[in-house]
Amino acid sequence: MDATNTETTDIGKSELAHITESANVPTLLMVLYQVTGDRRWLAAPYLPTRTKGLGDHDTGGLPEDVQAEIRQAAVDAFDHLLHGRPPAIDVPTSEQTAEMLGVCVGEPVDDSYGVMLAEEFRRRVGAAGEDSRLEARVPGDFRVLVIGSGVSGIIAAQRFQEMGVPYLMVDKHDSPGGNWLDNRYPGAGVDTPSHLYSYSFAPHDWGHHFELRASLEEYFGKAFDLVGARPNARFGTEVVRAEYDEAEARWRVTLRAADGTTEVLPFNAIVSAVGMLNRPKLPAVSGLDRFRGPSFHSSDWPADLDIAGKRVAVIGNGASAMQIVPAIAGQVGQLTIFQRTPQWIAPFDKFQQPIDEGSRYLLRTFPIYRTWYWLKLYWQFGDKVLDSLRKDPEWPHPERAVNARNDGHREYFTQYIRDELGDRTDLFDKTLPTYPPYGKRILLDNGWYRALRRPNVTLVTDAVESVGETGVVTCSGAAYDADILVWATGFDATRFVSSLDVIGRGGVTLRQAWDDDDARAYLGVTVPGFPNLFLIGGPNSFPGSGSFMYFMEVQMGYIARLFASMFAAGAAAIDVRKDVYEEYSDLVDRTSELTVWTHPGTNTYFRNARGRLLFVSPFRNVEYWTRARKSSIEDYHVLATVPGR
């Protein structure tokens, strides 16, 4: 195991002591136990308190003298690693991982997580694991088409490069990055910690706890080159049509270049990494084209737009508006926000906060420290939260929460609203949601309530009904003049793979198979009748909470294992069995009904027009991981074999 990514071993203990002053104490404890093997670091008086909320809990809730003892001991541990000495515990077992993480976060962690996260630990520190370096005897003419060079496309490229699977990647943009190329509005950034929004195969020296768009675009460009994808990529190219040729067991794919010319190429398999939050959705209001000033969706923010002193109307109050409003409120003359439904918003203590240089040194130098910090963040933002999202049939107040823990979140967030609004009590009823917390995507507060308190900001709770030459009119008949209209109204998130025509066996299109907006896929990855078509980020495969990046790596890991099994079996094409697909779809629907996202008081892009949950996964992350691990080529029909194999 690579204990360090050593930039220098010429660093003394006095400097290490200074560096550890900014370290996360619960993470230091994990390093101490692993380096020394001494179990006293997993017992009192060193036990951190339970991590509350989404903060880093840097002190572990421990007394200052105990923290000081831990930090001093960590100096010796890091010095041990810097001098090339192995830790006492090279790689924790699954049982050790579960126990250690439980100590780190201050609450019990089930052994099932130990199995999953021990494997993830191995991957992130560079130790050989069950899923690493899959051997694949690839047929000589086999080639895959990867659609999209965003977050998921880079994951696919990394796996295919590792396996030696030839592929062509196409993207309509002129560079990699996906959504981070499109969304250039003020304040655009992640609401997931930077180290959680990172590839396992591309650790990065992040400068801020939550990075903004420019840094993210740069990261994905570097990751794209790191995995060696550029020689296999064709930018400025769109996939127009993909049709399966049953006789040849190949896909015939029509590509269109930026100049409008088209060509048809054969591929043995397709991996769709097109993403979902990339097709802007505008409301059905009259007069959209009548407004005389700039009017645009938030994802199309003009690069040369001058907002200084202008009257700006922002229609919508979701994730994009949450970032835009605080970023521009101090620059515009008047800002009017049109809110359809108030959002639950969590404190965001480290918004735009830089990571201390000492912590950055530890994170980039010691894979053990970086991985335990990742595991800690993963738990806080992942399945720990999901337990509060399951409906308790015995809970007596289902109108306001789905269980007692969820109701506790309601009380906490409600008090946070009161505290942030202060003397602006007139805004309280407008901003307090009536549905349970997490019923819609939880947002992180980057100054939203403080922006609402500004004298030049007005919050309107009437829906916009029409647009005129000088502004908008609400359903109550009130008119609001504006110089600029910003439509922060989200994306069409229910029509998966809608940017191209996909025709499978028997001439059935993917849109027909999904009855337009009722998408389903086995493990979110594949659909019967569409052999060798694999989706990363398909229906019900976005984690309800946690690391999107990790979830997509899990999906691609599953796809990679299918490819390896297919090659080993001499199969040219596989098609998921319909009974397997239908059983999984039924399980998704039954499990979805147990979650807050199907609460009757919510209206969210997570569900389609029929009310069915199809965007997020209703499962705990460990449940999905386990199911994907158990699935194999036995869940598929082998439709064709490679001659001579």
Image: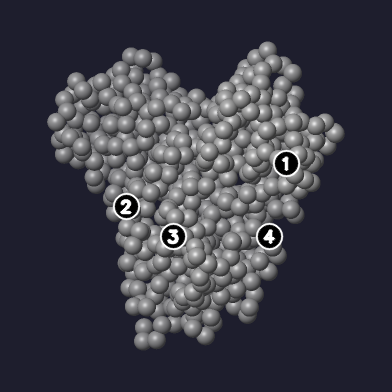
Compute the Cα span from label 1 to label 2. 46 Å
Q: Check residue 235 in the rendering and tell me which mark sits there, or answer none.
A: 3
- Please tell me whether mark 3 or mark 1 is closer to you in this view: 1
Whole-percent x and y of residue 495?
A: 64, 58
- Give the residue type that dot 2 points to: Leu
Estimate the x, y position of residue 176 in percent, counting from the top left: 43, 53
Classify mark 1: residues with Cα within 10 Å, few (<14), some (14-19) or many (20+).
some
Is 356 located above or below residue 184 in the figure? Answer: above
Q: Residue 462: where, in percent of width, then height?
A: 79, 33
Which secondary structure lies at badge 2? helix
Decide: few, some or many residues near mark 3? Use Cα within 10 Å; few <14, some 14-19, many ≥20: some
Element on which disc 3 rests: strand
Mark 3 or mark 1, which has the lower sequence index? 3
> Residue 226's mark?
2
Of the numbered discs 2 and 4, the one sitting upstream in the chain is 2
Q: Amino acid at mark 4?
A: Asp
> Which of the two marks, 1 or 2, is nearer to us in this view?
1
Q: Which mark is residue 291?
A: 1
Marks 3 and 1 sit apart, C-alpha to C-alpha, by 35 Å
Q: Position of residue 535 (x, y in %)?
A: 52, 61
Which quarter shows the C terminus? bottom left
Separation of marks 3 and 2 at Cα, in angstroms: 18 Å
Distance from the alpha carbon under mark 2 to that under mark 4: 37 Å
Q: Name which residue lies at 20% across and 37% down.
A: 7
Q: Earlier in the sequence, mark 1 or mark 2?
A: 2
Residue type (three-letter) at the residue carrying disc 3: Phe
Residue 337 at least partly seen: no
Q: Is residue 254 left or right of residue 428?
A: left
Question: Count of labels shown?
Answer: 4
Taking depth in this image into account, of 288 and 204 the one nearest to the observer is: 288
Distance Cα–Cα, label 4 vs label 1: 35 Å
Label 4, on which residue? 518
